[in-house]
Image (cartoon, rainbow, N blue to C red):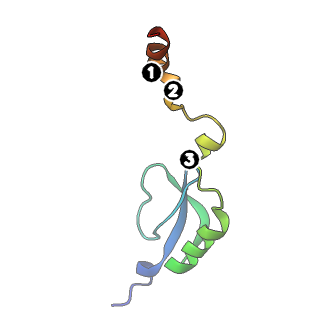
Amino acid sequence: MNNTTEDRYLVVVNHEEQYSIWFADRELPAGWEPAGKDGGKQECLDHIEQVWTDLTPRSVRTGSAPSAGSAGSAGSAGSAVR
């Protein structure tokens, strides 16, 4: 039994522009979309290495991620105690 889809992968990307590979014959998990490349496992991993040059999540790169001090609780407690 030689199933050719067993060795086929898709390069996928999420909303944070993080890349991964996924089996070509399986439904993609929620939050992931095809990135336009398919092939063997190593071929897909090589492609990711070429295109994913900044591993920082998109929300951090664009400044849309909440920072640790943005909740205000730690900062306001520290400023109240002097």
The amino acid type, in three-letter code, at marker 3 is: His
Pick whichever of labels 3 and 2 is earlier in the sequence. Answer: 3
- Please give the residue where the numbered disc 3 appears in the rendered image: 15
Q: Is residue 40 visible?
A: no
Residue at point 65%, 43% (across, down): 61
Q: Quadrant of the N terminus?
A: bottom left
The answer to whether the residues at label 1 and label 3 have Cβ atoms under 8 Å apart is no
- Please give the residue where the numbered disc 1 appears in the rendered image: 74
Inter-mark Cα distance, 1 to 3: 29 Å
Inter-mark Cα distance, 3 to 2: 24 Å
Residue that extends furthest to the left in the rendered view of this protein: 1
Residue at point 55%, 66% (across, down): 11
The amino acid type, in three-letter code, at marker 1 is: Ala
Instruction: Say which element carries label 2.
Output: helix
Foreground label between 1 and 3: 1
Pick whichever of labels 1 and 2 is earlier in the sequence. Answer: 2
Inter-mark Cα distance, 1 to 2: 7 Å
In the depicted structure, whether residue 77 falls above or below residue 11: above
Instruction: Say which element carries label 1.
Output: helix
The answer to whether the residues at label 1 and label 2 have Cβ atoms under 8 Å apart is yes
The amino acid type, in three-letter code, at marker 2 is: Gly
Residue 31 picture location, percent across and down: 48, 49
